[in-house]
Image (cartoon, grey):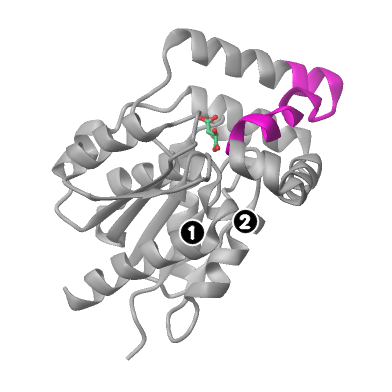
């Protein structure tokens, strides 16, 4: 009997490739899906950039793929989308993994910064304004000991269409606080964080785990991109969660 499928939602400013090393370790009998967070321009005029719309479209994609219930795992922006899925499509979420992320909305200054970055990316027609993130999303140990990881992440960032980067910033700026949605959830939750994450650090993860009554996994010597920096540890945490879901 195949296990509950796992859906892996990527962070910003990246795409599904950030999960490929984790997905390779999960496979087996279990379906693992790596959707892009949908941002296509065709619907922008109708709905504007929101992660709620992205979540609705992922729910549609999963339904079309025959997935009615899944373990949903999201890293950072992917976590915001996972919480939007939980809020808007609760029957879909059989278990939840929140990886280097948070449930709160942006403070006004952070929102302003995002809107400024979106405007700059559109003005320049490049991703220059977010290229520097490669320095902040990787942990100190990875940056110093494994420069090839930084090169890989930089190449992923460079490959992002500027319109997608601008869309994501505006959508993240518009997101709402989902702490209470998470608190009400009764399914199994795992919170994962790199102990060198300086974007959404261990304190934030401990608070998230407390709210969700979740299992907390702190991955040593990695930063905000724990799933890229140590895919083995993150895959093990997700596999354990999926087994809990399968056991009911
Ligand atoms: C991410 O990794 O997805 C970003 O750090 C999310 C954010 O900008 O809040």
Spatial CA distance of label 2 from label 1 is 8 Å
Residue 14, relative to residue 107: is it above or below?
below
Q: Report the residue at 51% width, 14% height from top.
A: 110
Q: Residues within 10 Å of mark 1 (few under 14, many from 20)?
A: many
Q: Please provide percent x and percent y for residue 2.
A: 36, 86
Residue 75 placement, left or right of 218: right
Q: Is residue 92 magenta?
A: no
Judged from the image, the secondary structure of the residue bearing numbered disc 2 is: helix
Q: Which of the two residues, 214 or 160, is positioned nearer the viewer here? A: 214
- Disc marking residue 8: 1
Residue 71, relative to residue 100: is it above or below?
below
Say which label, 2 or 1, has the lower sequence index: 1
Work out whether residue 40 can be spotted: no
The quadrant of the picture showing ligand 1 is top right
Q: Are marks 2 and 1 in contact (CB under 8 Å)?
A: yes
Residue 228, relative to residue 176: is it above or below?
below
> Which quadrant of the view contains residue 100?
top left
Q: Please provide percent x and percent y for residue 172.
A: 51, 29
Judged from the image, the secondary structure of the residue bearing numbered disc 1 is: strand
- Write the start and end of the magenta stretch as one range: 120-139
Q: Please provide percent x and percent y for residue 99.
A: 42, 47
Residue 54 placement, left or right of 182: right
* Dominant secondary structure, magenta: helix
> Which quadrant of the view contains residue 94?
bottom left
Q: Which of the two residues, 50 or 79, is positioned nearer the viewer here? A: 79
- Disc marking residue 135: none
Work out whether residue 58 can be spotted: yes
Q: Please name the residue that numbered disc 2 is placed on.
A: 16
Q: Report the residue at 43% width, 75% height from top.
A: 66
Q: Residues within 10 Å of mark 2 (few under 14, many from 20)?
A: some
Image quadrant containing the N terminus: bottom left
């Amino acid at each position: 009997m195949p296990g509950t499928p796992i859906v892996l939602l990527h962070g910003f400013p990246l795409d599904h490739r950030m999960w490929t090393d984790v997905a390779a370790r999960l496979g087996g009998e279990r379906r693992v899906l790596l959707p892009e967070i949908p941002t296509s321009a065709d619907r922008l005029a109708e709905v504007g950039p929101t992660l709620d719309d992205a979540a609705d479209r992922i729910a549609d994609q999963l339904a079309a793929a025959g997935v009615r219930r899944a373990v949903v795992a999201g890293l950072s922006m992917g976590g915001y989308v996972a919480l939007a899925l939980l809020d808007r499509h609760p029957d879909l979420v059989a278990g939840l993994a929140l990886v280097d992320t948070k449930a709160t909305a942006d403070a006004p200054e952070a929102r302003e910064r995002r809107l400024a970055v979106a405007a700059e990316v559109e003005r320049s027609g490049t991703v220059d304004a977010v290229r520097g993130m490669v320095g902040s999303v990787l942990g100190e140990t990875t940056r110093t000991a494994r420069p090839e990881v930084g090169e890989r992440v930089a190449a992923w960032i460079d490959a992002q269409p500027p319109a997608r980067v601008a869309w994501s910033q505006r959508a993240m700026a518009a997101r709402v606080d989902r702490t209470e949605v998470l608190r009400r959830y009764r399914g199994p939750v795992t919170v994962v964080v790199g102990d060198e994450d300086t974007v959404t650090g261990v304190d934030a993860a401990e608070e998230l785990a407390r709210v969700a009554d979740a299992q907390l996994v702190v991955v040593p010597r990695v930063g905000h991109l724990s799933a890229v920096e140590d895919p083995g540890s993150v895959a093990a945490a997700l596999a354990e969660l999926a087994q809990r879901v399968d056991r009911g």
